[in-house]
Amino acid sequence: MKQNTSNLLAIAPDVGVKRPIDPFAQIVGTLRRIKSKQAKLSQERKDGEAVLKAALVAAGATVGTVNGVPVVSFASSVRVALDQSLLKEARPDVFEEFSDVSEVWTFRLLAA
């Protein structure tokens, strides 16, 4: 197993170490509002896409037009994916050899 250290940040405080960021409270509030708006917009987008997909499927079409101009498409494609769980079970040696371990930092807005 190889370890990817090229993307590591400078040494950071241990998980759980707290630091007041009161001067940035306005930014935290802004991020909360943005996150809420994003969730609503994401749902609105999904709903709109579902309507358009259904209309295309019902018409047996893959391209939708407005005033004769193509504006949306909905087509199938083939995706090949590696089943990591199955590989790990069947060939743990290969899984281990090609595994890449790297540190990942995750930013979360915590509940107030």
Image (cartoon, rainbow, N blue to C red):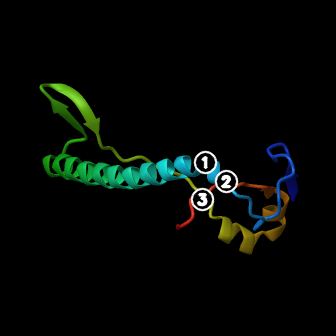
Q: Would you say the residues marked 1 and 2 are in contact, meaning their CB atoms lie under 8 Å apart?
A: yes
Q: Position of residue 67 (x, y in %)?
A: 12, 26
Residue ID at (40%, 50%): 38
Residue under pointer 3: 108
Reading the image, the residue beneath label 1 is 24
SS state under label 3: loop
Residue 53 vs residue 16, the one in the foreground? 16
User: Which residue is at 36% across, 47% downward?
Assistant: 76
Q: Is tag 2's residue or tag 3's residue first in the polypeptide sequence?
A: 2
Q: What residue type is labelled 3?
A: Arg
| Residue receiving disc 2 | 21
Q: Do the residues labelled 2 and 3 touch (CB within 8 Å)?
A: no
Query: Residue 58 or 41: which is nearer the viewer?
Result: 41
Mark positioned earlier in the residue sequence (1 or 3): 1
Give the residue at the far bottom of this rendering. Answer: 89
Label 2: which secondary element: loop
Q: Residue at x 23, y 28 (%)?
A: 70
Amino acid type, residue under disc 2 in the picture: Ile
Circle 3 residues within 10 Å: few <14, some 14–19, many ≥20: few
88 vs 64, nearest the viewer:
64
Quadrant hosting residue 108: bottom right
Q: Residue shown at 33%/44% (left/top)?
A: 75
Q: In front: mark 1 or mark 3? A: 1
**The quadrant where residue 14 appears:** bottom right
